[in-house]
Every structure is written in structure tokens, then in C-alpha cells.
Amino acid sequence: MKGSIINKNMWKFVDWLLVVIIFILVGYSLLSIINATASPFTGDEQGFAEFFANLDLSAALWQLVFFGIGLVLMFLVMLVDYHTLAHLTDWIYWAVVALLVAVYFLGSKQNGTVGWFMIGSRGFQPAEVCKILMIIVLAKLLSDKTEGNENGIQSFKDVFPALWRLAIPVALIVIQPDMGTAMVYVITFAVMLFMAKTSWKVWLILIGIVGAAVGIYLVYIANDAGNYQWTRILAFFRPESETVQSADATLQMDQAKLAIGSGGFFGKGLFTPGSLSQLGYVPFSNNDFIFAVTVEAFGFLGGLVLIILYFLLVSRTFMLSLRAKDDFGAYIIIGVAAMTLFHVVENIGMNIGLLPVTGIPLPFFSSGGSSMILNCIAFGFVLSVDMRRQRWQGQ
């Protein structure tokens, strides 16, 4: 019926391939989470009852609950014409700042970071959900400069409005401290700038600003005795240093690499007695280091399948940006694709020892409500933009 919120013609323009990839990733994650959280098996279990008694399904069930909530939010976001958000970006931006200020003063400290609002035993991390909100804000600012302009961004003054708006949330996240999440914001914006055809002169200025900021921050944390972020950086670049050895800072990475190596080509299988993940050697096995647990169980082949799924997800998302009807929509999709890609590269990189350890989760795979809901909302916006490449409303 014309004028109704839900029009049956909208379903013709949903990119179902993207939706299917997401469902496969979540299904795969449930297997890995159940395996990671199960009590150690001995191999002497008799019958289904004894086998089932070793399983702890709570984390997997919560993952499923959060995915269900995420799907509802994804659907609701798809119904919203993303153009209506263009007029609300100032309100969205200051809401982001308010949330990050509030969590710093009123939030709870988890794993060394004051970035959580606790609701009972569950936590909500505003910095996660604010990622997609900042993508929308930055997309609007960049599209204001590039829509109808084939030359892209050619001067620093064109990028400055977006730059200072990015700097405030990043600074608020850095002081939590959560450098990993702050890096997501910066890298996502960098990819959006690249796609906006930013000139090399502007890039030189931006690289200088970022380099100076990083240098000042490194000097600060290096002089802060016992700073765990500095210890993690040293663990990656100088694992033999006395600071790293005394803090045993390479333990997480070493145990993850050991689990990955023990999986071989085909893996040890799920719930295998004596596996490192079953014995509790892999830290944060159902979130930060779930890739290591997955590869131990399913082997190199299982890890390769997971990487291929992420390649399909990210490449498909980038492809959808090419058919967006305007720059605002294209930048939203590009921002989501860049955010997802950075999460995947950083998480897998730290699991295999190629990148420093951070708390970056694996999208749709790591256990965690904030991350799951963020990703569902983010891809809801991707689908919303792509659907409106055609005007299905009222047809």
C-alpha cells in the first residue's frame, strides 16, 4: 500500500548475498564459541548426557540473543532513508561526544579500560556503537565537499571540519585508554579520505599531524611506569627486553600462536581432549583470540575458510559503494567496509603474531554484545544505502 512503512518492493533491492555471508559467519562463530567455552573433555565421556554436561552454552546463547537483537535493529535501520540522517549529523556528533565523556566519568573499568556502562553483569561499550555514528558524520562532511566535484578534496581547509570532529572522540577514547579502538576511527577515516580523492599535499599535512600526535603519545606512555599499552608495544617490537620479560607480556600472543600451530592442516576437531583451548591455555578464547581457537579446531583449512568469508564480506561491501546513488551513501558504505577490514586484519594479525595485541574483536565472530550489535547496525546502513539505489518506495 502506498505510503506504508514497509513496502513489499523493498525486498527486491536487498543484497541477499551480503546477508547470507553474515549468517554463515555467525553460525561458524557459534561452533567456535561453544568449543572455546566447553569444560575439558577426557575422551571417556559415555553417552550424550556426559558429553552435554561438559558444554557451557551460555556464551553461545548470548551471542545468538545479541545477533537476534542486531537483526531487528538491522531491519529497522534498513527502513530508514539514510538521507534523513544528513540533516541530523550535528546532533549525532554531539551525542557521540556526550556518550564518550559520560562513560569516562561514569563508566566501569574492564580489562584496564574505563569504557563500559555495566547493566547487571553485562557491559555496553559506547565507543563500539559510536563507530558507525562517526562514519555517518564524516560521510556527510566529506560528501559536502565532493558531491558534483570530480577533483575530490584538494585543500586542507576542505578536510579540516571533518578532522577536528574526528579528533575529539579519538582523544576521549585514547584517555580511556583504548588505543585499539582509536586506531579503528583513524584508519576508517583515512580510507574514506582516500576514496574522496584527497590530494597528496593534504595527505602530507595529515601524515605530519598524525605522526606528531603518535610521537607525543608514545613519549607519554613510555614515561609512565607499568603502562600496559607501552608494554604491549615493546612486546611486539622488542620481546627480549627486560620490561617485557618481567611482565610476561608475550604470553597471550605466544599461546595463541602455539594453538594455531598445533591445529595443523585439518585441525584437531571440536572438543578434542588435550587441545590447548580446552585446557585453558588460550586467553580470551571466545573473543580476542577466537581465531586461534578456531584454527586449532578446524586447522589451516578452517582458518582459510574464515578468511575467505571475510574477503567476500568486505569486497562485496566495497562493490556496493560503487553503485550508491550519491557520495553520502557511498562514503557510509566505504566507512563500514574499512572498519570491518581493519578489525579483521588487526585481530587475525595479533593472533598470528604479525601485529601488536589489542582488544579488537573479530566482526560477527568474537563473543560480545556491543560488537555484534554495532556490526548489525553498520551493515543495516550498508543495505539501506544500497536498496535506495532504486526508488522502491510507493512502487
Image (cartoon, rainbow, N blue to C red):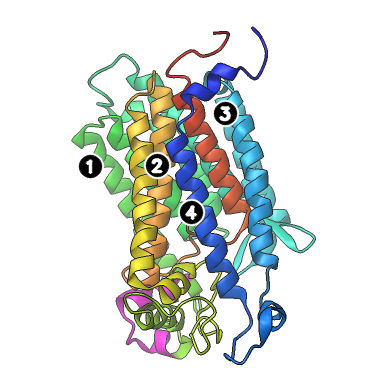
Residue 287 in the image: state x and y as whole percent: 54, 66
- State if disc 3 and disc 2 touch (CB < 8 Å): no
Is 20 or 195 nearer to us in this picture?
Answer: 20
Residue that appears at 67% across and 13% down = 4
Task: Nearest to the eye among marks 2 and 4: give it.
Answer: 4
First-in-chain label (2 vs 3): 3
Image height check: is 73 above or below 275? Answer: above
- Badge 2 is on which residue? 337
Circles 2, 1 touching at the beta carbon (< 8 Å): no
Q: Nearer the viewer, mark 4 or mark 3?
A: 4
Mark 3 crowd level (few <14, some 14–19, many ≥20, 10 Å Cα): many
* Residue 172: x %, y % from top left: 55, 50
Q: Give the range drawn in magenta.
A: 229-245
241 inside magenta stretch: yes
**17 to the left or right of 69:** left
Q: Which residue position is annotated with label 4? A: 25
Question: Disc 1 on helix, strand or loop?
Answer: helix
Q: Where is residue 114 in the image (x, y as percent from the top left)?
A: 63, 61
Please name the residue that numbered disc 1 is placed on: 204
